[in-house]
Amino acid sequence: MTDRREPAELPVDLLADLDAGALDPARAAVVRAAAAGDPQAAAVLAALDATRAELGALADPPVPARYAARWESALAAEAARTVTPLESGSDPASAPAEAERPQLHPGGDIGAPAPLPSTSQRFDPDPQPPTAPSGGRLPRLRPSSGRRRRTAIPRRRVRPAIVAGAVLAAAVVAGVVRAPQEPAPLSLDGVDLAAAGLAVQGDFDVGDLADPARRAGCLRTVESPGVSPDAPLLGGREVVVDGRDGVLLLLASGRLGRLQVVVVEPGCGPEGGVLLGTQTIEA
Amino acid sequence: LVLTGGPSDAELLAAHRAGDQRAFGELVARYRNRMWGIAVRTLHHPEDAADVVQEALVAAYRRAGTYRGEASVRTWLHRILVNACIDRLRQERRQGTVPLPQVEPRERRLDVAVDVVTRLSVVDALAELPAPQRVAVVLVDVQGWPLDEVAEVLEVPVGTVKSRCARGRVRLGKLLGHLREEE
């Protein structure tokens, strides 16, 4: 197989089994000994090594921000429609007793409504009202990629605001929307900062930094390069960066086609602050 | 990744079962990137991969109450993901939507320029493998998981994982030009 003029004496599949450790020790010893004196077998083993090396060099691509936001929305919708989602199917043998259940976030509100997706996202044209946990249908709150799907799911473009309105209406009808709630922080691990910045455009979940004066004081303090303290806020979101809480700000730069993404610690203000990340987005 | 001093995966899952709304998000944050990597390498298309990760996360959210601790949370979570990937691949196969190979395996040749043009990328080559081999190779060779944990995720013996990897590597070796097709 490795040489057309002189086929290998040892079958490639056998060598691959040896290489993978799939042979029992006695058989492996025999094959290994035979391969040691066979240059073609050595070439096959080297080829398998090279194949593995190529596979091992594949890095995980970063999670696109739009997908991260979609998953977050789906989980938020799941949380919203199941007040106690996990107890019905719980296994008494493995469920911790009430007194010993860890409460990692004492302020957590069981059954609190989930954040609704931003209207800046595109959604499936056929949003379904939430179903019972056993219903099996996932809330598919996701942006449209525009690609042609290989699976036969008919789609059509719908204006985002209209679709988001439909989702909101369905959620209200189903009793999902009960009270305003801040969305959970968005993890930026593995997410491109520019993409994350663009994804939060139109969201303004920035806590105290919604106050222009405080925001300006913060930006002045952290001295992010190229960022004006008075830059208009285009969007923002509470985030988590490497385990640290932060606030992502998407800012206008005053120059056409250029935006600034700045991530600061939540307490940032005129009295001080920490810059966690910054990036310029050029059109 | 478990931060020093932070809650373990099992503690996070228990907290989630107890109603802590942030706990599951923390768990997801630990494994989201890796789940994405597995899904996108297995399914070969980002949109499908994103669908499957979403399905897996929601399924895990729903099934958290049935987690018995027999496997690690990481194994449990990835088993859900891998099963979702395999279901998606089978669905595509039933629908006849699996694309045919567009590039023949390259031959060994001296013309480097032609070689680069005709050579299948690793990512494209992976997509040519049958689902069981593809998943095993992605977990073992791409993600670097230990064989015993892959066996646990796939719910097959370790020997089966080794065998699937062996067959997959031979096929990939041919597609990538490291091995020649037999005549």
Image (cartoon, grey):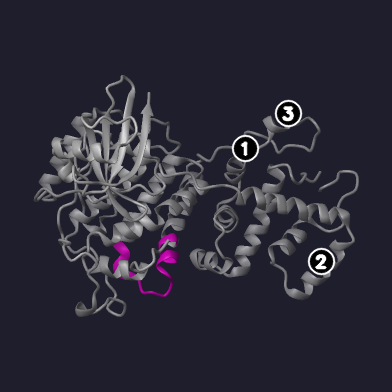
The vertical placement of A68 against B111, above or below, is below
Q: Which marked residue is nearer to the observer: mark 1 or mark 2?
A: 2
Badge 2: residue crowd in 10 Å (few <14, some 14–19, many ≥20)? some
Label 3, label 2: how far apart the Cα atoms are: 36 Å
Query: Residue A90's spot in the image, x, y percent?
Result: 27, 72
Residue A142 visible, this orientation: no
Which residue in the protein does label 2 denote?
A: A32
The residue shown at (57%, 44%) is B127
Helix, strand or loop under label 3:
helix
Magenta-highlighted residues: B62-78
Residue B161 visible somewhere in the drawing = yes
- Residue B63 among those drawn in magenta: yes
Residue corresponding to mark 3: B114
User: Secondary structure of the magenta portion, mostly?
Assistant: helix
The answer to whether marks 1 and 2 mark residues whose Cβ atoms lie closer than 8 Å is no
Residue at figure coordinates x 54%, y 47% from the top left: A59
Q: Separation of disc 1 and disc 2 at Cα?
A: 34 Å
Residue beneath disc 1: B101
Q: Nearer the viewer, mark 3 or mark 1?
A: 3
Depth order, front residue of A220/B61 = A220
Tell me which numbered mark, 3 or 1, is placed earlier along the sequence: 1
Query: Which residue is pictured at 29% across the width and 26% down the height?
Result: A253
What secondary structure is found at the residue carrying circle 2? helix
